[in-house]
Amino acid sequence: MFSRLSGRTWLVTATAAGAYMGSRSRCGGEKEKEDRKIVIIGGGTAGLGVAAMLRNEGFRNVKLVEPNSQHYYQPLWTLVGGGIMDNALTARGMEDVLPSGVEWVQKRAKTFDPSHNRVALEDGTSVDYDVMVVAAGIQIDWNKIPGLVQGLGKEGSGVVSIYDYKYCEKTWREIKPFLDKPTSKLLFTMSPTLIKCAGAPQKIMWLVEDTLRGLGKREGADISFWTPGAAMFGVKHYSDKLEALREARGVRGVFHHELVGIDLDSKTATFKDKRSGGLVAEPFDVLHVAPHMSAPDFIKASPLAGEQGWVAVDQATLQSTKFDNVFALGDCISTPNSKTAAAITSQAPVLVHNLMKFVEGKPLDGAYKGYSSCPILIGKNKVMLAEFGYGGKLMETFSAETGKFPLSLLGQEGALQERLFYFLKRTVLPFAYWNMWVKGRWYGTNGPFKPDVTKK
């Protein structure tokens, strides 16, 4: 009897001990996540998405440093500028989209002190961290083009831009009167710098062109696209298609020309010929400007910055190349991808995966492959979906060659596809953003399914 009781006692004790040790092991990992102080700089698309994903992964001490009280879904600003959408639908209060459990520090970051794991804020206070994520976005340098700020601020100047919430509606107000006039001169410019959504300067152009065509007023409109570059787009596959579209629709392409000044009194734009250095004066009725952009000044001046001022990160892992406990994503980083919201949806799960590996003391095996997407509006209800990775490699979701089953059965080209992609841009993606992305439940081309981001 004693022997049997001892055996039972031993079995119960061993089972309980095993469960206890297993519980200890699991709780140890959870405890580590709870204790780690995560600070995210920037509450835009990148910062908000990562904050939500980290909370979903069990991190409990997450702070989001963001001074603005409004949050914007910027991909719709083109549709606002084209008179299709209400600007108010692109904005929500930060308190309405802040992930549950994330502490919002409504202040502006001023300087980084990564050697002491500290960020100084503009009001003189600071926040400390164990791991920092920089998602500070891109800086728009409106003052780089003389006359631009004044033109944007003056009603009736004809100077417009869809690159800011406060200017989107003005774009349509300035364009609309010329839809009824027999003639008009409409100029659309490309920036000489890296910019967010490099397709946007011509999205608004194609939208206006198609609107005029539908009203029977296209013949009297002189529409031109002015770019410092040598082609319509940075990826040849799509550039060739856009060049063919430009020729078919009678849009003038003025290549190797950079906008360097605006005279509001004469409504004249001055361009510099990048080859000869000469200046060209061009009158306009409406001038849509893609402004200069750069890394935020406080990043340029920080120890995190690389040679061009962007946060220097490994282009696969998104870990800082200078400080191991710093990660970054979005428009502020040095990776050679196109800066778009779609790129962020691909980067975020990689960063979160690698941040978790870092916390666990394991090798970082998640890899971002440069994916970016630009749904280029080529009409009022048509989109050319450009998807590519590092080096311009095609990464098309719906194509038979590079797509994912079953989406690859649909195909990437054709009239039906153009309308479907417009529906995705206009309706599906905004819904996914406001209802899933801000909750950490949307993974770009993977939809609601968490992707395997490990290196292959």
Image (cartoon, rainbow, N blue to C red):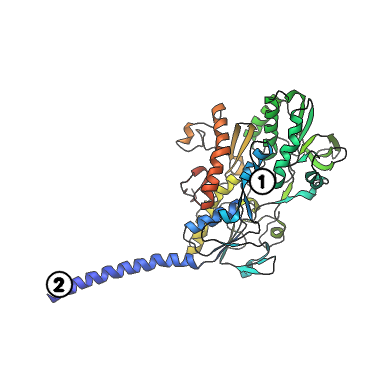
Q: Position of residue 275 (x, y in %)?
A: 81, 38
Residue 137 screen position, x and y as percent: 65, 53
Quarter of the view holding residue 111: bottom right
Quadrant of the frame with the N terminus: bottom left
Residue at the extreme right: 265
- Residue situated furthest bottom in the rendering: 2
The span from disc 2 to disc 1 (Cα, nearest Å) is 74 Å
Q: Which quarter of the picture shows residue 112?
A: bottom right
Residue 259 at what x, y percent from top left?
80, 41
- Structural crowding at the residue carrying mark 2, measured as other residues with C-alpha within 10 Å and reported as few (<14), some (14–19) or many (≥20): few
Could you tell me which secondary element the residue under label 1 belongs to?
Answer: loop
Location of residue 330 with respect to 273 vertically, above or below: below
Residue kind at label 2, given as amino acid type: Arg
- Viewer-proximal residue among 267 and 88: 88
Q: Which residue is mark 2?
A: 4
Q: Residues within 10 Å of mark 1 (few under 14, many from 20)?
A: many
